[in-house]
Amino acid sequence: MTTPDPNLPTVIALHCSGATGRQWHRLAAMVSPHAHFIAPDLTGCGADTFHDGRPVTSLMDEAAPVIEMIDASPGPLHLVGHSYGGAVALRAALERPNHVASLALYEPSAFSLLRGLGAAGNAL
């Protein structure tokens, strides 16, 4: 990841299963003048350089590179996710809640994550 301009917010957008980071090309065009926009290809999709050969056997494995991006960001960032990408974004946000300014999820397939939230997750 290139070092983002510290004067611009960072947006990480994660695609659904069977798609690639190109899913977000229209959003990238709208957001890029105003933010550092990252839309990686998740495991087995597109170029899939996101994991650099690391095995992915869990949602946490998939979220690990996103968490690295969050840690490298100069300030709180914005996570966007669709379906499986929404689940990955939510997993990453749960690991770094103080580093995520916003979370926009569309059809996140993350119901199992609710169990980890205890009573609050059960209420949801």
Image (cartoon, rainbow, N blue to C red):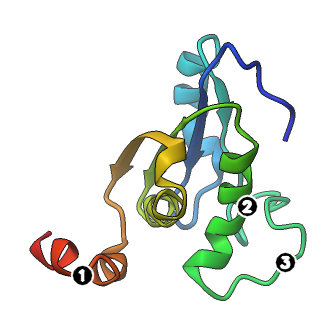
Query: What residue is drawn where x is 54% and y is 44%?
Result: 99
Q: Amino acid at mark 3?
A: Arg
Relative side of 53 to 36, left or right = right
Relative side of 32 to 122, left or right = right
In the picture, residue 41 is in which quadrant? bottom right
Q: Is residue 79 above or below residue 2?
A: below
Q: CA distance from mark 3 to mark 2?
A: 10 Å
In the picture, residue 12 is in which quadrant? top right
**How would you rate the neighbour count of disc 2 (Cα within 10 Å): few for under 14, some for 14-19, many for 20 or more?**
some
Q: Residue furthest front?
A: 98
Residue 78: x and y in percent read 50, 37
Return the residue at label 1: 118
Query: What residue is drawn where x is 55% and y is 54%?
Result: 15
Residue 24: x and y in percent read 56, 38
Tag count: 3
Q: Amino acid at mark 1?
A: Gly
Front: mark 2 or 1 = 1
Helix or strand or loop: what does disc 1 sit on?
A: loop
Residue 59: x and y in percent read 56, 78
Front: mark 1 or 3 = 1
| Residues under numbered marks 3 and 2 in contact, where contact means CB atoms less than 8 Å apart | yes
Q: Residue furthest left?
A: 123
Residue 16: x and y in percent read 50, 60
Q: Is residue 47 above or below residue 61?
A: above
Q: Amino acid at mark 2?
A: Pro
Helix or strand or loop: what does disc 3 sit on?
A: loop
**Label for residue 17?**
none
Relative side of 20 to 84, left or right = right
**Label for residue 65?**
2
Query: What residue is drawn where x is 54% and y is 56%?
Result: 96
Query: What residue is drawn where x is 76% and y is 19%?
Result: 5
Going from the N terminus, do you reach mark 1 or mark 3 first? 3
